[in-house]
Amino acid sequence: MCFLSDSCFFFLIVGAVAVHASPAGCPVEGRSVRTPPRGGNVSPINQFLETEVRAPGVNISKYLTDYGYMSAEDEGDEAKETEAIYQFQKLANVNPTGRLDLETVFSMNKPRCANEDKLPGKHVEYSKFFEAPVEAQNDSLWRFKLGPTGKWKDKDITWKINRYTNDLPRETVHSTMQKAFQAWATVSGLTFREATQWEDPDFDIQFVAGDHGDGSAFDGPGGVLAHCFYPQNGRAHFDDDETWSVGINEPNAINLEWVAIHEFGHGLGLDHSEIFDAVMYPFYPSFTETINLRPDDIDGIQTLYGPGTGGNAATQAPVGTTPRPTTVPSRGHSSSHGPFAGSSSQPRSCPVPTMNAAFVDHLGQVQMISDDEIWSFTDRGVNTLSPTQTWRYNMYYPRDVNAVVTVDSGLTYVFSGMHVFEFDYRSQFPALKYVEYMGISTDTKIDAALLYPTNKAIYIFQGTQYYKVDPTTLEIEPSYPRPIYLYWSGVPDNLDAALAYKGDVYVIKGDRYWKFDTVTNEVPAGYPRSVNEDWFNCDSQMSGNIQGEP
Protein backbone atom coordinates (compact mmCIF):
# COMPACT_ATOMS: atom_id res chain seq x y z
CA MET A 1 0.00 0.00 0.00
CA CYS A 2 1.40 3.40 -0.94
CA PHE A 3 1.33 5.62 2.12
CA LEU A 4 2.51 9.12 3.04
CA SER A 5 2.80 10.26 6.64
CA ASP A 6 0.85 13.48 6.06
CA SER A 7 -2.04 12.22 3.95
CA CYS A 8 -5.05 10.01 4.36
CA PHE A 9 -6.04 7.30 1.93
CA PHE A 10 -9.51 5.94 1.85
CA PHE A 11 -9.21 2.22 1.20
CA LEU A 12 -11.97 -0.07 -0.01
CA ILE A 13 -11.04 -3.73 0.01
CA VAL A 14 -11.94 -5.51 -3.20
CA GLY A 15 -14.58 -8.16 -2.77
CA ALA A 16 -15.60 -6.95 0.70
CA VAL A 17 -18.14 -9.12 2.41
CA ALA A 18 -20.93 -8.28 4.83
CA VAL A 19 -19.94 -8.05 8.46
CA HIS A 20 -21.15 -11.00 10.48
CA ALA A 21 -22.56 -9.25 13.54
CA SER A 22 -25.46 -9.71 15.89
CA PRO A 23 -28.47 -7.65 14.71
CA ALA A 24 -29.63 -4.74 16.82
CA GLY A 25 -31.57 -6.00 19.80
CA CYS A 26 -29.98 -9.48 19.70
CA PRO A 27 -26.93 -9.26 21.98
CA VAL A 28 -24.52 -11.95 22.91
CA GLU A 29 -25.04 -13.21 26.45
CA GLY A 30 -22.02 -12.42 28.56
CA ARG A 31 -18.72 -10.94 27.47
CA SER A 32 -15.43 -12.80 27.41
CA VAL A 33 -12.48 -11.39 29.29
CA ARG A 34 -9.17 -10.96 27.51
CA THR A 35 -6.34 -12.98 29.01
CA PRO A 36 -3.34 -12.46 26.72
CA PRO A 37 -0.53 -14.91 27.39
CA ARG A 38 2.90 -13.67 28.39
CA GLY A 39 4.91 -15.06 25.52
CA GLY A 40 5.06 -18.36 23.70
CA ASN A 41 5.19 -19.37 20.08
CA VAL A 42 1.60 -20.42 19.32
CA SER A 43 0.52 -17.76 16.83
CA PRO A 44 -3.25 -17.11 17.19
CA ILE A 45 -3.29 -15.89 13.60
CA ASN A 46 -1.76 -19.07 12.18
CA GLN A 47 -3.90 -21.20 14.45
CA PHE A 48 -7.06 -19.51 13.20
CA LEU A 49 -6.09 -19.81 9.53
CA GLU A 50 -5.31 -23.52 9.94
CA THR A 51 -8.70 -24.31 11.49
CA GLU A 52 -11.12 -21.84 9.86
CA VAL A 53 -11.68 -22.56 6.18
CA ARG A 54 -14.46 -19.95 5.87
CA ALA A 55 -12.15 -17.01 6.60
CA PRO A 56 -12.30 -14.32 3.88
CA GLY A 57 -9.21 -13.58 1.87
CA VAL A 58 -7.41 -10.98 3.96
CA ASN A 59 -3.78 -11.05 5.07
CA ILE A 60 -4.38 -10.71 8.80
CA SER A 61 -0.77 -10.15 9.81
CA LYS A 62 -0.28 -7.50 7.13
CA TYR A 63 -3.54 -5.80 8.08
CA LEU A 64 -2.59 -5.51 11.74
CA THR A 65 0.87 -4.30 10.77
CA ASP A 66 -0.29 -1.79 8.15
CA TYR A 67 -2.75 -0.17 10.54
CA GLY A 68 -0.35 0.13 13.45
CA TYR A 69 -1.50 -2.62 15.80
CA MET A 70 1.82 -4.47 15.75
CA SER A 71 5.16 -4.41 13.98
CA ALA A 72 6.44 -6.91 11.45
CA GLU A 73 8.81 -8.22 14.13
CA ASP A 74 5.78 -9.13 16.30
CA GLU A 75 4.47 -11.67 13.79
CA GLY A 76 4.33 -15.12 15.40
CA ASP A 77 4.57 -13.75 18.97
CA GLU A 78 1.54 -15.08 20.81
CA ALA A 79 1.23 -12.28 23.37
CA LYS A 80 1.75 -9.43 20.90
CA GLU A 81 -0.60 -10.89 18.30
CA THR A 82 -3.24 -11.40 20.99
CA GLU A 83 -2.89 -7.81 22.14
CA ALA A 84 -3.05 -6.52 18.55
CA ILE A 85 -6.22 -8.52 17.88
CA TYR A 86 -7.77 -7.26 21.11
CA GLN A 87 -7.03 -3.61 20.25
CA PHE A 88 -8.48 -4.01 16.76
CA GLN A 89 -11.61 -5.66 18.15
CA LYS A 90 -12.15 -2.71 20.47
CA LEU A 91 -11.98 -0.27 17.57
CA ALA A 92 -14.08 -2.41 15.23
CA ASN A 93 -16.90 -2.78 17.79
CA VAL A 94 -16.34 -6.55 18.00
CA ASN A 95 -16.48 -8.53 21.24
CA PRO A 96 -12.91 -7.92 22.51
CA THR A 97 -11.50 -11.31 23.44
CA GLY A 98 -8.02 -11.15 21.89
CA ARG A 99 -8.90 -14.27 19.93
CA LEU A 100 -9.62 -14.36 16.22
CA ASP A 101 -13.09 -15.29 15.02
CA LEU A 102 -15.05 -14.83 11.82
CA GLU A 103 -16.67 -11.59 12.97
CA THR A 104 -13.25 -10.06 13.61
CA VAL A 105 -11.84 -11.12 10.25
CA PHE A 106 -14.97 -10.01 8.41
CA SER A 107 -14.47 -6.59 10.03
CA MET A 108 -11.01 -6.46 8.47
CA ASN A 109 -12.74 -6.68 5.09
CA LYS A 110 -14.88 -3.61 5.72
CA PRO A 111 -14.23 -0.49 3.60
CA ARG A 112 -12.03 1.91 5.52
CA CYS A 113 -9.54 4.71 5.46
CA ALA A 114 -5.95 3.57 5.02
CA ASN A 115 -4.44 5.80 7.71
CA GLU A 116 -3.06 3.92 10.68
CA ASP A 117 -5.42 3.53 13.61
CA LYS A 118 -2.63 3.98 16.12
CA LEU A 119 0.37 6.26 15.60
CA PRO A 120 2.21 6.29 18.94
CA GLY A 121 4.22 9.43 19.50
CA LYS A 122 2.77 11.26 16.49
CA HIS A 123 -0.61 12.27 17.83
CA VAL A 124 -2.04 13.96 20.87
CA GLU A 125 -5.37 12.70 22.11
CA TYR A 126 -7.96 14.89 23.81
CA SER A 127 -10.68 13.94 26.25
CA LYS A 128 -13.55 15.85 27.78
CA PHE A 129 -12.25 14.58 31.11
CA PHE A 130 -9.12 16.75 30.82
CA GLU A 131 -8.57 20.48 30.35
CA ALA A 132 -5.18 19.89 28.73
CA PRO A 133 -4.05 17.38 26.12
CA VAL A 134 -2.76 14.07 27.35
CA GLU A 135 -0.27 11.93 25.53
CA ALA A 136 -1.69 8.90 23.75
CA GLN A 137 -0.79 6.39 26.43
CA ASN A 138 -4.09 5.60 28.18
CA ASP A 139 -6.47 3.69 25.92
CA SER A 140 -9.22 3.46 28.55
CA LEU A 141 -10.93 6.60 27.22
CA TRP A 142 -12.16 6.60 23.64
CA ARG A 143 -11.89 9.98 21.99
CA PHE A 144 -11.21 11.88 18.82
CA LYS A 145 -7.61 12.41 17.71
CA LEU A 146 -5.89 15.42 16.22
CA GLY A 147 -3.69 15.14 13.17
CA PRO A 148 0.09 15.56 13.21
CA THR A 149 0.38 19.01 11.60
CA GLY A 150 -1.94 21.16 13.73
CA LYS A 151 -4.62 23.42 12.30
CA TRP A 152 -5.09 26.17 9.74
CA LYS A 153 -3.80 29.55 10.88
CA ASP A 154 -6.71 31.41 9.29
CA LYS A 155 -10.31 30.49 10.10
CA ASP A 156 -11.52 31.81 6.72
CA ILE A 157 -10.69 28.89 4.43
CA THR A 158 -10.97 28.85 0.66
CA TRP A 159 -11.71 25.96 -1.66
CA LYS A 160 -11.99 25.29 -5.37
CA ILE A 161 -12.85 22.32 -7.58
CA ASN A 162 -10.21 22.23 -10.30
CA ARG A 163 -11.21 18.90 -11.87
CA TYR A 164 -14.69 17.35 -11.92
CA THR A 165 -15.96 13.79 -12.32
CA ASN A 166 -18.21 12.79 -15.20
CA ASP A 167 -20.30 10.60 -12.89
CA LEU A 168 -22.37 13.56 -11.69
CA PRO A 169 -23.41 16.96 -13.04
CA ARG A 170 -20.99 19.72 -12.11
CA GLU A 171 -23.71 21.51 -10.16
CA THR A 172 -24.27 18.38 -8.09
CA VAL A 173 -20.57 17.96 -7.35
CA HIS A 174 -20.33 21.63 -6.41
CA SER A 175 -23.34 21.56 -4.08
CA THR A 176 -22.11 18.32 -2.48
CA MET A 177 -18.77 19.91 -1.66
CA GLN A 178 -20.64 22.89 -0.21
CA LYS A 179 -22.62 20.56 2.04
CA ALA A 180 -19.47 18.80 3.17
CA PHE A 181 -17.77 22.06 4.14
CA GLN A 182 -20.99 23.38 5.65
CA ALA A 183 -21.20 20.38 7.97
CA TRP A 184 -17.95 21.56 9.58
CA ALA A 185 -18.76 25.30 9.37
CA THR A 186 -22.05 25.01 11.24
CA VAL A 187 -20.43 23.52 14.33
CA SER A 188 -17.08 25.32 14.37
CA GLY A 189 -15.52 28.76 14.29
CA LEU A 190 -14.66 28.28 10.61
CA THR A 191 -15.99 29.91 7.49
CA PHE A 192 -15.50 28.56 3.98
CA ARG A 193 -15.73 30.40 0.70
CA GLU A 194 -15.10 29.44 -2.86
CA ALA A 195 -11.81 30.89 -4.10
CA THR A 196 -11.77 33.30 -7.00
CA GLN A 197 -10.02 32.36 -10.22
CA TRP A 198 -6.99 34.41 -9.16
CA GLU A 199 -6.57 32.81 -5.73
CA ASP A 200 -4.68 29.70 -4.73
CA PRO A 201 -7.26 27.80 -2.64
CA ASP A 202 -6.52 26.20 0.70
CA PHE A 203 -8.42 23.12 -0.46
CA ASP A 204 -7.57 22.10 -4.02
CA ILE A 205 -10.24 19.54 -4.96
CA GLN A 206 -9.65 17.27 -7.95
CA PHE A 207 -11.08 14.08 -9.38
CA VAL A 208 -8.10 12.24 -10.85
CA ALA A 209 -7.12 8.70 -11.74
CA GLY A 210 -3.99 6.59 -11.63
CA ASP A 211 -0.69 8.37 -11.10
CA HIS A 212 -1.68 12.02 -10.65
CA GLY A 213 1.63 13.51 -9.55
CA ASP A 214 1.57 13.57 -5.75
CA GLY A 215 3.41 10.29 -5.23
CA SER A 216 0.24 8.45 -4.22
CA ALA A 217 -1.23 6.91 -7.33
CA PHE A 218 -4.80 5.67 -7.35
CA ASP A 219 -5.31 2.05 -8.34
CA GLY A 220 -8.54 1.94 -10.31
CA PRO A 221 -12.03 0.86 -9.21
CA GLY A 222 -12.40 -0.79 -5.85
CA GLY A 223 -9.14 0.35 -4.30
CA VAL A 224 -8.13 3.69 -2.86
CA LEU A 225 -11.12 6.05 -2.91
CA ALA A 226 -9.61 9.37 -1.93
CA HIS A 227 -6.94 11.08 0.10
CA CYS A 228 -6.58 14.48 1.72
CA PHE A 229 -3.49 16.10 3.16
CA TYR A 230 -3.41 17.69 6.62
CA PRO A 231 -2.97 21.47 7.18
CA GLN A 232 -1.26 23.42 5.69
CA ASN A 233 -1.55 21.28 2.56
CA GLY A 234 -5.22 20.89 1.70
CA ARG A 235 -5.03 18.84 -1.49
CA ALA A 236 -8.14 16.68 -1.65
CA HIS A 237 -8.07 14.05 -4.39
CA PHE A 238 -10.92 11.69 -5.29
CA ASP A 239 -10.33 8.63 -7.47
CA ASP A 240 -12.18 9.23 -10.73
CA ASP A 241 -12.13 5.51 -11.50
CA GLU A 242 -14.69 5.03 -8.74
CA THR A 243 -18.42 5.40 -9.34
CA TRP A 244 -19.55 8.45 -7.37
CA SER A 245 -23.11 9.09 -6.26
CA VAL A 246 -25.09 11.37 -3.98
CA GLY A 247 -27.60 8.64 -3.22
CA ILE A 248 -27.59 6.99 0.19
CA ASN A 249 -26.94 3.23 0.26
CA GLU A 250 -26.86 3.06 -3.54
CA PRO A 251 -25.45 -0.30 -4.68
CA ASN A 252 -22.06 -0.32 -6.43
CA ALA A 253 -21.48 3.39 -5.84
CA ILE A 254 -19.69 5.54 -3.27
CA ASN A 255 -21.50 8.37 -1.51
CA LEU A 256 -19.52 11.50 -2.33
CA GLU A 257 -20.82 13.63 0.55
CA TRP A 258 -19.80 11.15 3.25
CA VAL A 259 -16.29 10.68 1.83
CA ALA A 260 -15.88 14.44 1.35
CA ILE A 261 -16.87 15.24 4.95
CA HIS A 262 -14.47 12.58 6.23
CA GLU A 263 -11.58 13.74 4.04
CA PHE A 264 -12.16 17.43 4.76
CA GLY A 265 -12.03 16.52 8.45
CA HIS A 266 -8.48 15.28 7.87
CA GLY A 267 -7.74 18.42 5.86
CA LEU A 268 -8.89 20.53 8.81
CA GLY A 269 -6.59 18.73 11.25
CA LEU A 270 -8.58 15.78 12.60
CA ASP A 271 -7.42 12.20 12.58
CA HIS A 272 -9.52 9.10 13.14
CA SER A 273 -11.99 8.85 15.98
CA GLU A 274 -12.51 5.67 17.96
CA ILE A 275 -16.25 6.39 18.34
CA PHE A 276 -17.78 3.87 15.99
CA ASP A 277 -20.55 6.06 14.52
CA ALA A 278 -18.49 9.25 14.14
CA VAL A 279 -17.81 10.50 10.62
CA MET A 280 -14.10 10.40 11.48
CA TYR A 281 -14.33 6.70 12.41
CA PRO A 282 -11.95 4.90 10.01
CA PHE A 283 -14.52 2.49 8.51
CA TYR A 284 -16.75 3.56 5.65
CA PRO A 285 -20.38 2.92 6.72
CA SER A 286 -22.05 -0.06 5.07
CA PHE A 287 -25.45 1.49 5.70
CA THR A 288 -26.61 4.92 6.80
CA GLU A 289 -29.91 6.80 6.69
CA THR A 290 -28.45 10.27 7.20
CA ILE A 291 -25.02 11.89 6.98
CA ASN A 292 -24.47 13.82 10.19
CA LEU A 293 -21.53 14.82 12.31
CA ARG A 294 -21.67 13.11 15.67
CA PRO A 295 -20.83 14.76 19.03
CA ASP A 296 -17.31 13.33 18.94
CA ASP A 297 -16.65 14.91 15.51
CA ILE A 298 -18.01 18.20 16.82
CA ASP A 299 -15.90 18.09 19.98
CA GLY A 300 -12.82 17.46 17.85
CA ILE A 301 -13.32 20.34 15.43
CA GLN A 302 -14.31 22.71 18.25
CA THR A 303 -11.14 21.81 20.14
CA LEU A 304 -9.20 23.13 17.15
CA TYR A 305 -11.32 26.08 16.02
CA GLY A 306 -13.88 26.91 18.71
CA PRO A 307 -17.70 26.63 18.70
CA GLY A 308 -19.97 27.22 15.74
CA THR A 309 -20.79 30.65 14.39
CA GLY A 310 -22.97 29.56 11.47
CA GLY A 311 -20.22 30.21 8.95
CA ASN A 312 -20.89 30.37 5.22
CA ALA A 313 -19.72 27.58 2.98
CA ALA A 314 -19.34 29.70 -0.15
CA THR A 315 -19.75 33.27 -1.30
CA GLN A 316 -21.97 32.10 -4.14
CA ALA A 317 -23.51 28.91 -5.42
CA PRO A 318 -23.63 27.70 -9.01
CA VAL A 319 -26.79 28.24 -10.99
CA GLY A 320 -29.50 25.74 -10.12
CA THR A 321 -28.30 24.87 -6.62
CA THR A 322 -29.35 26.03 -3.17
CA PRO A 323 -26.76 26.20 -0.38
CA ARG A 324 -27.59 24.36 2.84
CA PRO A 325 -28.76 26.82 5.55
CA THR A 326 -25.85 27.88 7.73
CA THR A 327 -27.84 27.54 10.95
CA VAL A 328 -31.10 26.06 12.08
CA PRO A 329 -33.68 28.86 11.59
CA SER A 330 -34.22 30.70 14.85
CA ARG A 331 -37.68 30.86 16.32
CA GLY A 332 -36.76 33.71 18.59
CA HIS A 333 -36.61 31.67 21.79
CA SER A 334 -33.72 31.36 24.22
CA SER A 335 -34.30 29.52 27.45
CA SER A 336 -33.58 31.11 30.84
CA HIS A 337 -34.37 27.90 32.73
CA GLY A 338 -33.31 24.29 32.75
CA PRO A 339 -29.85 22.72 32.52
CA PHE A 340 -28.93 24.65 29.35
CA ALA A 341 -30.14 28.11 30.37
CA GLY A 342 -28.97 30.79 27.95
CA SER A 343 -28.68 28.41 25.01
CA SER A 344 -30.43 29.28 21.76
CA SER A 345 -29.58 26.12 19.82
CA GLN A 346 -32.47 24.10 18.44
CA PRO A 347 -32.94 20.64 16.94
CA ARG A 348 -33.94 20.07 13.32
CA SER A 349 -37.65 20.43 14.08
CA CYS A 350 -40.01 21.45 16.85
CA PRO A 351 -41.78 20.29 18.88
CA VAL A 352 -39.87 17.18 19.92
CA PRO A 353 -41.83 14.05 20.86
CA THR A 354 -42.17 12.53 24.32
CA MET A 355 -38.90 11.01 25.49
CA ASN A 356 -38.59 7.32 26.41
CA ALA A 357 -35.28 7.77 28.21
CA ALA A 358 -32.71 10.39 29.17
CA PHE A 359 -29.20 9.83 30.47
CA VAL A 360 -25.71 11.28 30.80
CA ASP A 361 -23.18 9.18 28.90
CA HIS A 362 -19.61 8.34 29.91
CA LEU A 363 -18.38 11.59 28.31
CA GLY A 364 -20.74 13.66 30.47
CA GLN A 365 -23.07 14.52 27.58
CA VAL A 366 -26.85 14.40 27.86
CA GLN A 367 -28.64 12.03 25.47
CA MET A 368 -32.42 11.73 25.05
CA ILE A 369 -34.18 8.86 23.28
CA SER A 370 -37.65 8.81 21.75
CA ASP A 371 -38.61 5.60 19.97
CA ASP A 372 -35.80 5.01 17.42
CA GLU A 373 -34.28 8.52 17.50
CA ILE A 374 -31.74 10.14 19.81
CA TRP A 375 -31.08 13.80 20.62
CA SER A 376 -27.56 14.72 21.75
CA PHE A 377 -26.54 17.71 23.88
CA THR A 378 -23.28 19.47 24.63
CA ASP A 379 -22.64 22.03 27.36
CA ARG A 380 -24.00 24.61 24.91
CA GLY A 381 -27.36 22.90 24.46
CA VAL A 382 -28.93 20.55 21.95
CA ASN A 383 -26.90 19.50 18.93
CA THR A 384 -28.52 21.31 16.01
CA LEU A 385 -28.04 18.21 13.84
CA SER A 386 -30.24 16.15 16.19
CA PRO A 387 -32.06 13.87 16.05
CA THR A 388 -30.34 10.90 14.49
CA GLN A 389 -31.19 7.22 14.51
CA THR A 390 -30.51 5.51 17.84
CA TRP A 391 -28.71 2.65 16.12
CA ARG A 392 -26.16 5.17 14.83
CA TYR A 393 -25.34 6.03 18.44
CA ASN A 394 -24.96 2.35 19.25
CA MET A 395 -25.99 -0.31 16.76
CA TYR A 396 -26.58 -2.83 19.56
CA TYR A 397 -29.10 -0.78 21.51
CA PRO A 398 -32.46 -2.60 21.68
CA ARG A 399 -35.37 -1.33 19.63
CA ASP A 400 -37.59 -0.38 22.58
CA VAL A 401 -35.63 1.53 25.23
CA ASN A 402 -37.42 2.24 28.53
CA ALA A 403 -34.59 3.70 30.59
CA VAL A 404 -30.81 4.23 30.45
CA VAL A 405 -28.29 5.00 33.19
CA THR A 406 -24.49 5.30 33.10
CA VAL A 407 -22.52 4.72 36.30
CA ASP A 408 -19.14 6.12 37.30
CA SER A 409 -17.25 3.03 36.11
CA GLY A 410 -18.35 3.86 32.54
CA LEU A 411 -20.82 0.97 32.30
CA THR A 412 -24.20 1.86 30.81
CA TYR A 413 -27.35 -0.10 31.65
CA VAL A 414 -30.14 -0.04 29.06
CA PHE A 415 -33.55 -1.28 30.23
CA SER A 416 -35.88 -2.70 27.60
CA GLY A 417 -38.92 -4.67 28.67
CA MET A 418 -37.72 -7.41 30.99
CA HIS A 419 -34.11 -7.17 29.82
CA VAL A 420 -31.12 -5.20 31.04
CA PHE A 421 -28.30 -4.65 28.53
CA GLU A 422 -24.90 -3.83 30.02
CA PHE A 423 -22.61 -1.81 27.75
CA ASP A 424 -18.94 -1.10 28.29
CA TYR A 425 -18.02 2.04 26.32
CA ARG A 426 -14.66 0.50 25.45
CA SER A 427 -16.36 -2.16 23.34
CA GLN A 428 -20.02 -1.03 23.03
CA PHE A 429 -20.93 -4.71 22.80
CA PRO A 430 -23.65 -5.74 25.27
CA ALA A 431 -23.98 -8.35 27.96
CA LEU A 432 -27.51 -9.46 28.79
CA LYS A 433 -29.15 -9.53 32.22
CA TYR A 434 -32.77 -9.74 33.32
CA VAL A 435 -34.91 -7.36 35.35
CA GLU A 436 -36.31 -10.38 37.15
CA TYR A 437 -32.77 -11.28 38.23
CA MET A 438 -32.48 -7.88 39.90
CA GLY A 439 -35.64 -8.47 41.91
CA ILE A 440 -37.73 -5.80 40.19
CA SER A 441 -41.40 -6.47 39.49
CA THR A 442 -42.05 -7.75 35.97
CA ASP A 443 -45.74 -6.77 36.02
CA THR A 444 -45.01 -3.47 34.27
CA LYS A 445 -42.07 -1.93 32.44
CA ILE A 446 -39.45 0.28 34.09
CA ASP A 447 -40.26 3.96 33.59
CA ALA A 448 -36.97 5.74 34.31
CA ALA A 449 -33.58 5.40 35.95
CA LEU A 450 -30.87 7.79 37.15
CA LEU A 451 -27.57 7.84 39.05
CA TYR A 452 -28.10 10.00 42.13
CA PRO A 453 -25.37 12.68 42.30
CA THR A 454 -24.60 12.44 46.05
CA ASN A 455 -24.68 8.76 47.06
CA LYS A 456 -23.99 7.42 43.51
CA ALA A 457 -26.78 4.83 43.81
CA ILE A 458 -29.04 3.92 40.90
CA TYR A 459 -32.70 4.84 41.41
CA ILE A 460 -35.24 3.03 39.23
CA PHE A 461 -38.80 4.33 38.90
CA GLN A 462 -41.68 2.01 38.07
CA GLY A 463 -45.28 3.21 38.23
CA THR A 464 -45.93 4.61 41.71
CA GLN A 465 -42.81 3.18 43.35
CA TYR A 466 -39.03 3.29 43.11
CA TYR A 467 -36.02 1.07 43.86
CA LYS A 468 -32.54 1.87 45.15
CA VAL A 469 -29.94 -0.29 43.40
CA ASP A 470 -26.24 -0.89 44.04
CA PRO A 471 -24.41 0.31 40.87
CA THR A 472 -21.72 -2.39 41.08
CA THR A 473 -23.86 -5.48 41.77
CA LEU A 474 -27.27 -4.32 40.46
CA GLU A 475 -28.78 -5.67 43.66
CA ILE A 476 -31.77 -3.93 45.21
CA GLU A 477 -31.13 -2.59 48.68
CA PRO A 478 -33.31 -3.83 51.58
CA SER A 479 -36.73 -2.22 52.27
CA TYR A 480 -37.34 -1.38 48.61
CA PRO A 481 -39.51 -0.66 46.65
CA ARG A 482 -40.93 2.43 48.30
CA PRO A 483 -43.71 4.86 47.26
CA ILE A 484 -42.48 7.78 45.17
CA TYR A 485 -44.70 10.36 46.88
CA LEU A 486 -43.25 9.66 50.36
CA TYR A 487 -39.61 10.28 49.49
CA TRP A 488 -39.65 12.33 46.28
CA SER A 489 -41.81 15.27 47.26
CA GLY A 490 -43.42 16.86 44.20
CA VAL A 491 -42.26 14.17 41.73
CA PRO A 492 -45.15 12.58 39.78
CA ASP A 493 -45.79 8.88 39.26
CA ASN A 494 -45.48 7.05 35.92
CA LEU A 495 -42.47 9.00 34.64
CA ASP A 496 -41.15 8.88 31.07
CA ALA A 497 -37.48 9.67 31.81
CA ALA A 498 -35.10 10.90 34.51
CA LEU A 499 -31.46 11.93 34.78
CA ALA A 500 -28.96 13.69 37.02
CA TYR A 501 -26.87 16.38 35.34
CA LYS A 502 -24.24 18.63 36.95
CA GLY A 503 -25.49 17.83 40.45
CA ASP A 504 -29.18 18.40 39.72
CA VAL A 505 -31.92 15.79 39.27
CA TYR A 506 -34.55 16.15 36.54
CA VAL A 507 -37.61 13.97 35.95
CA ILE A 508 -39.68 14.10 32.76
CA LYS A 509 -43.28 13.22 31.99
CA GLY A 510 -44.64 14.12 28.57
CA ASP A 511 -43.52 17.65 27.75
CA ARG A 512 -43.17 18.55 31.42
CA TYR A 513 -40.13 18.32 33.62
CA TRP A 514 -39.47 18.81 37.32
CA LYS A 515 -36.20 19.74 38.98
CA PHE A 516 -35.64 17.90 42.27
CA ASP A 517 -33.53 19.70 44.87
CA THR A 518 -31.09 17.16 46.35
CA VAL A 519 -30.55 19.36 49.43
CA THR A 520 -34.17 20.03 50.44
CA ASN A 521 -35.43 16.76 48.89
CA GLU A 522 -38.35 18.44 47.17
CA VAL A 523 -39.34 20.09 43.90
CA PRO A 524 -38.84 23.89 44.08
CA ALA A 525 -41.63 26.32 43.24
CA GLY A 526 -42.21 27.07 39.56
CA TYR A 527 -42.35 23.50 38.30
CA PRO A 528 -43.37 21.71 36.13
CA ARG A 529 -41.95 23.49 33.09
CA SER A 530 -41.84 22.66 29.37
CA VAL A 531 -39.13 20.34 28.03
CA ASN A 532 -39.66 21.71 24.52
CA GLU A 533 -39.14 25.30 25.63
CA ASP A 534 -36.35 24.96 28.20
CA TRP A 535 -34.32 22.07 26.77
CA PHE A 536 -34.92 22.45 23.02
CA ASN A 537 -35.78 26.17 22.73
CA CYS A 538 -39.03 25.48 20.89
CA ASP A 539 -41.66 28.22 21.10
CA SER A 540 -44.51 27.82 23.57
CA GLN A 541 -47.01 27.83 20.70
CA MET A 542 -45.38 24.65 19.42
CA SER A 543 -45.01 22.89 22.74
CA GLY A 544 -48.53 23.52 24.01
CA ASN A 545 -49.80 24.92 27.28
CA ILE A 546 -48.36 23.39 30.44
CA GLN A 547 -51.04 22.28 32.85
CA GLY A 548 -50.74 21.46 36.53
CA GLU A 549 -50.24 18.11 38.18
CA PRO A 550 -52.55 15.43 36.72
Image (cartoon, rainbow, N blue to C red):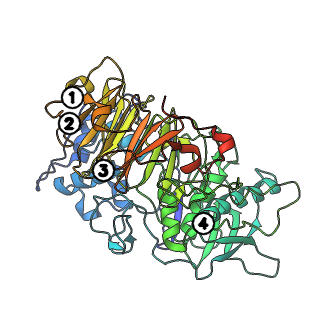
Left or right of 384 on screen, residue 487? left
Residue at horizontal 55 percent and vertical 58 percent from the top: 336
- Tags 2 and 1 in contact by the CB under 8 Å rule? yes
Circle nearer the N terminus (2, 1): 1
| Mark linked to residue 308 | 4
The residue nearer to you, when weighing 54 against 455, is 455
Residue under label 2:
474
Give amino acid for label 3: Thr
Cα separation, mark 2 vs mark 3, equals 27 Å
Secondary structure at numbered mark 3: loop
Please identify the residue farthest to the front as the structure is shown: 525
The residue nearer to you, when weighing 84 against 428, is 428
In percent of width and height, residue 331 lies at 70, 53
Q: Which class describes the residues within 10 Å of circle 3: few (<14), some (14-19), or many (20+)?
A: few
Secondary structure at numbered mark 1: helix
Give amino acid for label 1: Met
Cα separation, mark 1 vs mark 3, equals 30 Å
Cα separation, mark 2 vs mark 4, equals 41 Å
Query: Given this view, does label 1 or label 3 mark the residue nearer the observer?
Result: 3
Give amino acid for label 2: Leu
In percent of width and height, residue 512 lies at 51, 39
Residue under label 1:
438
Circle nearer the N terminus (2, 3): 2
Residue under label 3:
520
Residue at horizontal 37 percent and vertical 72 percent from the top: 131
Residue 216 seen by the camera: no
Q: Which class describes the residues within 10 Å of circle 4: few (<14), some (14-19), or many (20+)?
A: some
Left or right of 383 on screen, residue 242? right
In percent of width and height, residue 237 lies at 64, 65
Cα separation, mark 4 vs mark 3, equals 38 Å
